[in-house]
């Protein structure tokens, strides 16, 4: 093997470890069967852990700063890959203790989650349309199957069907968009596409209607994954019907991958030139309006929900709106504010990550132990499970964006970036939305602590080491959420993750 | 630009006409004496049983699915085999191809081990796998 | 239907004009009909519209999936046609291969899920699977 090839392989070492973990878990499953599910889970977690270690190696890739000319090796990719790998590991851990799934299906669940993580971590690094399509399909196909993983639940099958239908249509339309982008610019490489567009603009040859249409078609696929307003219909249904660990996976890993690639696409394709042009400006305004509509729609509809997973699903649509603010700032603002928009998006994604994994984890705990799924079932549970309910409140406070949590700092940075980027109205809309969000998040907290009878219900508690580890991870997340200085760590990390 | 498509238009019209004219002529001139045996799908041999529009056994589907995996694998083997001779490092190219084949083959082994290739396997609502 | 086709053809025509500029190939305009890029683009545009129409009008899950296949085929036709007429290298051919593989994989997953739906709901009508709603 030539040294360049070795450098390429070193750059994708985390993904190689994931592939190794997938193969190892599939083969181990054949030998140990369902009684060895903790062994299979440990193998998978070891693979994810090795991948995380390899990620911090700081491999620089081949001579052109990419791996195989397909995957960008940069701080942006490293940031999202770290989030994705951590999320994948936690989802596997939670999947081992989730009671809605049969033990016989857990061993097959684990490589499927790893496959989703692999697709997501390739997606955020992909610098090429072929790689983008392939990794997005890997992510999608695994998550369609995972959404229907509960064999005995009609709701789970229905969630899988809805996700599949919407997803297949969105990805087909995106592929058609790719074909037009490629035909119009003659390159599959994202930055090359950006350079050719910029050259066209310099030569007073602004991108024509064909390019606008191609962009719109590509954005259909990307916005679908990110559950942005006109393409969000799947999200609440799928979040409610899918097994809770899978819901976590969709809410964090899938969404992080979607925003990671969206930011890369926007930056490489549209921000390559010096001069802003007409298409860019109108695109920025469209994205800003979509962000406002998405967060408002998500928050207002969430108020009406009773099922907690569905409520969190609408809240994740709202958060997609907040995250899209960062993209809008990138498109509308000048160079300095564009960087600010991107960094605040990264930071907000990290804070959203902590709180969402935690909130779904607590919801899973309460469903496991008490069979509670609706806000009505939640009444008075704080007297039976005070620590988990306390953690849940911490996560909800962070999702609302109140101090002293990282969610507050995240929202603050996003508002600051959007104000600096000249989107003052969007900042105002976002702060008004936080007020609406306060109402429905505290509906859950109120049910847990202030309603119902103050009696202790034993429920069916877990026994053994693995559940203890799984629930300990929730408290670790809660600690990170409420530990104020941790947000400094995240900000420094986000700012040190250039594209 | 639209004039360039007159060939398509002429082709379409001619095509439709070529199909319709014999049918209309036949309808006008042929004798009509249909009877039950004559309108059967097969005029000779077996009597048809039931309807052709039935639901097929799901086991065909599993087999077809596994077939598709390997069919698509071949599509990927072709470019690999085509450039194999010009590869600078043949051993590496061979290894890469073998890893690909191994991963696809692992899928077949898993199917086999889980009993998805057994024809007698049936699906039941209560018991997931019933082997006989 | 005709109006839809015409409205779709409009952006494609402008796409064709741009591609001709990019390729800067004077012989394109004079080439015989089957040797022209816009012929392929029009066919792929028609396929795309048919796919979208299938998705929007059908309620049977399998027909909707067939609609997505039509769109993927339209994309594939575009890739191959651009690869043939533009001076873009082999990327398009490669992408076409990848898309074929993805379509097969997606259908495998889709059929498995549709079978589950039939098992659980006794129908694959998309309007009947409405257990999850607001």
Image: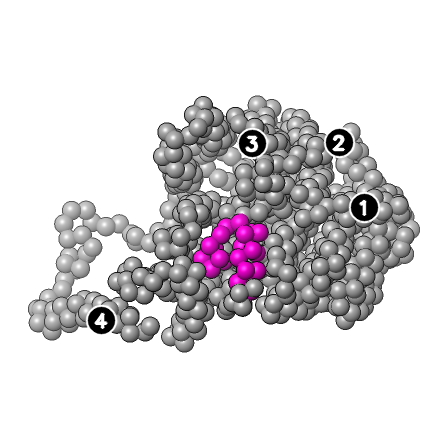
Q: Residue at x 78, y 29 (%)?
A: A465
Q: Residue at x 41, y 48 (%)?
A: C89
Query: Does dot 4 land on a helix, a strand or a loop?
Result: helix
Magenta stretch? A179-201
Query: Does dot 2 land on a helix, a strand or a loop?
Result: helix
For residue A466, which numbered disc appears in the image?
2
Residue A89: give x, y in percent of width and height.
70, 37
Q: Chain of mark 1?
A: A
Residue A478: give x, y in percent of width and height.
84, 44
Q: Earlier in the sequence, mark 2 or mark 3?
A: 3
Q: Is residue A144 magenta?
A: no
For residue A4, which numbered disc appears in the image?
3
Quadrant in the rendering for residue A237:
bottom right
Task: Verify CB contact (< 8 Å) between mark 1 and mark 4.
Answer: no
For residue A492, which numbered disc appears in the image?
1
Report the residue marked by disc 4.
Answer: B10
Q: Chain of mark 3?
A: A
Q: CA distance from mark 1 to mark 4?
A: 68 Å
């Amino acid at each position: 093997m030539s040294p360049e090839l070795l450098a390429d392989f070193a750059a994708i070492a985390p993904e190689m470890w994931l592939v190794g973990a997938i193969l190892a878990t599939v083969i181990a499953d054949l030998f140990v069967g369902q009684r060895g599910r903790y062994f299979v889970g440990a193998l998978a977690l070891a693979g994810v852990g090795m991948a995380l270690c390899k990620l911090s190696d700081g491999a620089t890739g081949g001579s052109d700063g990419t791996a195989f000319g397909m995957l960008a090796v940069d701080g942006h990719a490293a940031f999202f890959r770290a989030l994705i790998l951590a999320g994948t590991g936690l989802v596997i851990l939670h999947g081992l203790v989730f009671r809605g799934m049969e033990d016989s299906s857990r061993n097959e669940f684990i490589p499927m989650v790893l496959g989703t993580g692999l697709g997501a971590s390739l997606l955020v690094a992909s610098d090429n349309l072929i790689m983008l399509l392939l990794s997005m399909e890997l992510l999608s196909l695994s998550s369609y199957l995972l959404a229907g993983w509960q064999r005995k639940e009609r709701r789970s099958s229905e969630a899988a069907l809805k996700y599949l239908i919407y997803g297949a249509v969105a990805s087909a339309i995106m592929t058609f968009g790719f074909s037009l982008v490629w035909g119009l610019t003659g390159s599959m490489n994202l930055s090359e596409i950006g350079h050719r567009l910029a050259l066209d603009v310099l030569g007073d040859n602004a991108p024509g209607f064909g390019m606008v249409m191609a962009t719109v078609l590509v954005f259909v696929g990307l916005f679908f994954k990110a559950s942005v307003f006109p393409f969000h219909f799947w999200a609440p249904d799928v979040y409610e019907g899918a097994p809770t660990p899978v819901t976590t996976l969709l809410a964090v890993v899938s969404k992080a991958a979607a925003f990671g690639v969206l930011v890369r696409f926007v930056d490489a394709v549209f921000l390559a030139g010096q001069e802003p042009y007409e298409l860019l400006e109108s695109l920025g305004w469209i994205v800003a309006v979509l962000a406002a509509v998405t967060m408002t729609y998500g928050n207002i509809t969430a108020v009406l929900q009773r099922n907690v997973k569905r409520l969190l699903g609408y809240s994740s649509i709202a958060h997609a709106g907040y995250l899209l603010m960062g993209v809008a700032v990138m498109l509308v603002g000048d160079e300095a504010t564009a960087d600010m928009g991107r960094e605040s998006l990264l930071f907000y994604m990290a804070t959203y990550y902590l709180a969402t994994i935690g909130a779904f984890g607590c919801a899973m705990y309460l469903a496991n132990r008490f069979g509670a799924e609706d806000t009505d079932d939640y009444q008075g549970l704080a007297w039976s499970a005070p620590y988990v309910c306390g953690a849940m409140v911490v996560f909800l406070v962070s999702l609302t964006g109140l101090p002293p949590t990282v969610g507050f700092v995240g929202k603050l940075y996003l508002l600051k970036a959007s104000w600096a980027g000249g989107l003052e109205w969007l900042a105002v809309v976002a702060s008004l939305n936080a007020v609406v969000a306060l109402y429905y998040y505290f509906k859950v907290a109120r049910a847990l602590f202030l309603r119902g009878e103050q009696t202790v219900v034993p429920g069916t508690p877990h026994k053994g080491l693995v559940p203890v580890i799984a629930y300990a991870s929730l408290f670790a997340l809660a600690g990170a959420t409420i530990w104020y200085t941790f947000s400094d760590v995240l900000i420094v990390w986000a700012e040190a993750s250039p594209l | 630009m639209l004039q360039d498509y007159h060939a398509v238009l002429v082709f379409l019209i001619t095509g439709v006409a070529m199909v319709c004219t014999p049918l209309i002529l036949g309808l006008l001139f042929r004798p009509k004496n249909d009877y039950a045996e004559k309108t059967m799908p097969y005029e000779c041999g077996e009597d048809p049983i039931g309807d052709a529009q039935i639901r097929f056994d799901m086991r065909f589907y599993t087999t077809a699915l596994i077939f598709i995996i390997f069919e698509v694998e071949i599509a990927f083997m072709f470019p690999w085999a085509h450039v194999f001779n010009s590869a600078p490092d043949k051993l590496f190219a061979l290894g890469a191809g073998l890893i690909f084949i191994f991963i696809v083959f692992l899928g077949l082994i898993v199917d086999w081990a889980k009993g998805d290739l057994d024809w007698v396997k049936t699906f039941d609502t209560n018991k997931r796998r019933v082997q006989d | 239907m005709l109006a839809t086709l015409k409205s779709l053809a409009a952006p494609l025509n402008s796409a064709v004009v741009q591609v001709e500029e990019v390729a800067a190939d004077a012989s394109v305009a004079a080439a015989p009909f089957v040797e022209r890029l816009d012929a392929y683009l029009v066919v792929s545009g028609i396929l795309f519209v048919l796919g979208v129409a299938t998705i929007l009008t059908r309620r049977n899950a399998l027909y909707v999936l067939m609609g997505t296949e039509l769109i993927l085929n339209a994309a594939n036709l575009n890739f191959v046609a651009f690869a043939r007429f533009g001076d873009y290298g082999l990327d398009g051919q490669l992408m076409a291969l990848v898309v074929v593989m993805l379509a097969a994989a997606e259908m495998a997953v889709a059929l498995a899920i549709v079978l589950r739906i039939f098992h659980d709901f006794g129908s694959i009508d998309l309007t009947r699977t409405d257990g999850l709603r607001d």
